[in-house]
Amino acid sequence: MEQKYNVSSNPHVRDGMTTSRIMQLVVIALLPATLFGIWNFGFRAFLVVAVTVASSVIFEWLYDHFMHKPNTVKDFSAVVTGLLLAMNMPAQIPLWMPVLGSAFSIIVVKQLFGGLGQNFMNPALAARCFLLISFAGKMTNFSYSGFDGVSGATPLAVLKSGGTVDVPAMFVGNIPGTIGEVSVIALLIGAAYLLAKKVISIRIPGTYILTVVVFAILFGGHGFDLNYIAAHLCGGGLIFGAFFMATDYVTSPITPKGQIVFGILLGVLTGLFRIFGGSAEGVSYAIIISNILVPLIEKVTLPKAFGKEGK
């Protein structure tokens, strides 16, 4: 029998991992922190998650339908965006605000720039910053638990004002904050799952966290105070942002050196915002600003082709 060869253009390396499969794995990795947030903050947190995810999917479908584009709901990217946005909001937020945030993230940040793969910043974080700037009071109304509804300052705010914080409680998640960022242990379980599945690498989150530690030691005013350093690591959205948002394929560098530079930039900006800025937090703005600088980072760190400019 005559043997036939399939001739095609490069690349010739294929991978069975699809976009929808990657998104499904991210959803699975987010489940421990999501379920803890619902348990910790009560049924109201469940409503926020359900409304945000559902509205994100609906806005994606509506945009594709009216723009006569192929339906992209099945790739699960809208589900991931909605879930990330929900986890970035307090449980007591009015339910119309997640809907508004979903519309902003899906239509303005994602679809108007060409859809998945074309957005220049993380849609969920862009929507969070939009809501935070527009409705600061509602977005910073945190509570300890959905059972008693006790509100209070976040540990980072207490730390910034010179108070002391309970680091073990921060690690477990029995603190005020957004739905998905409070439990470090739940987030680390999800992060370990993504690393084991090789969905993400340790370069960006590892460099990011290490840079924050160095920045806190040098400029925090407490020296090598383990409790102070641990509070910065466990407080706010650092772990959540480092593993689940800074590692977004679309808005982070693809070059290994670029990922290291990206992580350092994230850490420096977060340290500047937290220690020298007016707010106790700074992860969201650090990631958004770094997203904008990704093309420049890749241009500088892009490896030269073999033999180019060689002697």
Image (spheres, rainbow, N blue to C red):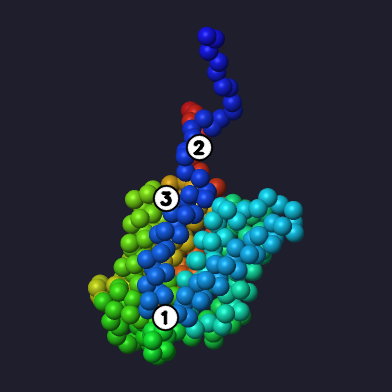
Distance of label 1 from label 2 (alpha carbons):
53 Å
Q: Which residue is mark 1?
A: 42
Distance CA(mark 3)–CA(mark 1): 31 Å
Sooner in the amino-acid sequence: mark 3 or mark 2: 3
Of marks 1 and 2, the one in the foreground: 1
Which quarter of the figure has residue 53?
Answer: bottom right
Of residues 241 and 86, the one drawn nearer to the viewer in this rendering: 86
Of 78 and 286, which appears nearest the observer?
78
Q: Which residue is mark 2?
A: 304
- The amino acid sitting under disc 1 is Gly
Name which residue lies at 55% across and 71% down. 52
* Whole-number angstrom distance, CA of label 3 to CA of label 2: 26 Å
For label 2, count other residues whose C-alpha is less than 10 Å away and answer few (under 14), some (14-19) or many (20+): few
The residue sitting at 45% across, 84% down in the picture is: 142
Query: Residue placed at 57% from the left, 75% from the top?
Result: 98
Q: Amino acid at mark 2?
A: Lys
Q: Is residue 50 left or right of residue 145?
A: right
Q: Which mark is residue 156?
A: none
**Residue 184 at what x, y percent from top left?**
34, 69
Picture quarter containing residue 124?
Answer: bottom right
Crowdedness of circle 1 by 10 Å Cα count: few (<14), some, many (20+)?
some
Left or right? Give the position of 171 relative to 261. Answer: left
Residue highlighted by disc 3: 199
**Residue type highlighted by circle 3:** Val
Helix, strand or loop at mark 3: loop
Badge 3 or badge 1: first in the primary sequence: 1
Q: Work out whether mark 1 precedes mark 2 in sequence or the reverse, and give the earlier one.
A: 1
The answer to whether the residue labelled 3 contacts the one labelled 1, judged by CB atoms less than 8 Å apart, is no
Label 1: which secondary element? loop
Q: As displayed, is residue 150 above or below residue 28?
A: below
- Disc 3 vs disc 1: which is toward the camera? 1
